[in-house]
Image (cartoon, grey):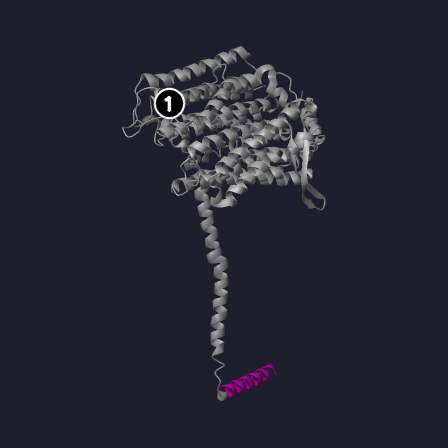
Amino acid sequence: MNSAFIASAVAEGAAAAAPADGITALAWLLVALPLAGAAILLLGGRITDSFGPGLATGLSWASFGVGAAIFFAMIDVPGADRVAQLTLYDWIPAGAFQLQAGMLVDPLSMAFVLLVTFVGSLIHVYSLGYMEHDPDRRRFFAYLNLFVASMLLLVLADSYLLLFVGWEGVGLASWLLIGFWNHNPAYATAANKAFVVNRIGDIGLALAIAMMFLTFGGVDFATVNQGVSQASTGAVTAIGLLLLLAACGKSAQFPLQSWLGDAMAGPTPVSALIHAATMVTAGVYLVVRSHAIYDVSETARLFVTVVGAITLVYGAIVGCAKDDIKKALAASTMSQIGYMMLAAGLGPVGYAFAIFHLITHGFFKAGMFLGAGSVMHGMNDQVDMRRFGGLATVMKVTWITFGLGWLAILGVPPFSGFWSKDKIIEAAFIGDGWQPWVFGTAALVGAGITAFYMSRLFFMTFHGKQRWTDDVDPHESPLTMTIPMMVLAVGSALLGLVLAMGDTFTTWLEPTLGHHAHEEPVIPIPVIMAATLLVVIVGAGYAWMRYVRESVPEVAPQGSLLTQAARKDLYQDDVNEALLMWPGIHLTRGMVFTDTAGVDGTVRGLAASIGGLSSRLRRLQNGYARTYALTMLTGVVLFLGALWVMN
């Protein structure tokens, strides 16, 4: 089935979306409930200190309840009827341009709704224990609710403009949460860095929306999807590249990935929320939701694939050299999102697999971030893995739950990552020419490096010699923290298997993404599976030799040039400073000089000239009659002299 046919079929399906009825008509509550929680906690002030966190947690779970009810109602209807349009109100009535605020309830948006509300609610519960002694935890829970509400608006919006509102809401909430402890200047700087880098991506989304209006005459999904087949390839490609720029900023993809490691400055529940179920997945959602555009433009789709391939290898290399447990997980997130972007760039063969891995990743990565927070809780907030070791004996629940997430991200069968990430590796080997060999090899190499750095993290933290100092007394976390970790661990172990049975998940997404016939990769699937398992075993085995069998130095050795570069994020900040910051500073200084010396100098010079002339002319007005008479006489003499000369 060719891509143009799929795009046309999906566009027709979007245009023919049935009006929401029954429980689906209550989809607005998904956003309204957590948004109300944020408003109550922020506007209620200290009055809500005692019950605010519990209220925020309850409203997040209530949103999940509404989402689950809508999901089960959708299961009972045929696949073609699982697309519903909920119109809220007339948003922008501007002459010929009419835009309603509405929600598109379909299999793709509901997959995100369930992920965001379920994992987000577990993180709320975890935060009850993690932030128990923080004096500003009411404000923290308000920001969590705002984050969830913004993400839900983003994935439920039926137009790119309303999506942009949720997009910016997520950006605002992330800035507030990353910089929550802004009394620490480094944390405030990290929040600002994330905010600025994301604004660069947001320029891409804003320009894409403007081009959609000029090209299609509208910015809602139905109008755009219907118009792509009649629009010029150049315009569609430009829109696709601008959307990719937006996705790179929000999902920390090359070359806008520099903010992600610094974002670990926020409380650990924030890291889990941003890096698992919400903010960094928004870029993947944007690309897959815009699949009609990428189906038409192979160039834009190729750029998506290249960005994903570069980022998955880049993040894996950086993760190998990080000793900060949260920054190592952040590099892992960057790499895993790269896998999703790679799959999305493969087109119809990879869209569903990108979302499949996004869902499973949301569980095992959130579980590992919460596990890292549990380790920090028991280790007096230390994050240096070289000061851990042997924690499996004193933090058994954290060790087991984290271990299941570790097996899942490695892709060890039958854990979740095996069913989702391996599908992306197989899909990367599908195609003609050089692309399957380059992208398939990148995905395969990334799997081996992932096995090494994630095993390094797991072994350095939980196994080997105990390396903590005497003033630390490691202990297990309370139930409010360990129960969410247990639930996520179950998802890490079983969710992939459940969703893969009978192609359940890919079939679920067909009303949105269309059906795609199976294609064989250039290498037989059993060979790909065997090669993937082999590189995973090699990577994990090498990590065991380095960090279990051998002693771990408490001070990081200098290492190779690549290791030194990876510790500095492969000099991404230096590149940004050289290419963006310093040229920007010099450009700003030049513009300031031009304004000061040119514009302001001209104005000041003219004013000074007029002032000087007027001060000299003012001397003629001295109030003496004889002076005025002499002036008049001089004038008459000059006038008569002029007449005499002229005659």
Kindly tell me whether residue 384 is visible in this rendering.
yes
Counting from the top left corner in percent of width and height, residue 212 is at 65, 38
Q: Quadrant of the C terminus?
A: bottom right
Q: Quadrant of the N terminus?
A: top right
Q: Quadrant of residue 168?
A: top right
Q: Give the answer, above or below, for where 529 lies relative to 582.
A: above
Pointer 1 residue: 395
User: Which structural element holds mark 1?
Assistant: loop
Label 1 crowd bin: few (<14), some (14–19), many (20+), radius 10 Å: some
Left or right: where does residue 212 sit relative to residue 123? right
The answer to which of 76 and 132 lies nearer the viewer is 132
Q: Residue at x 51, y 26 (%)?
A: 362
Q: Give the answer, above or below, for where 595 lies relative to 500.
A: below
Q: Which residues are magenta?
A: 627-647
Q: Amino acid at mark 1?
A: Met
Residue 387 within the segment the image draws in magenta: no
The answer to which of 602 and 568 lies nearer the viewer is 568
Magenta stretch: helix, strand or loop mostly = helix
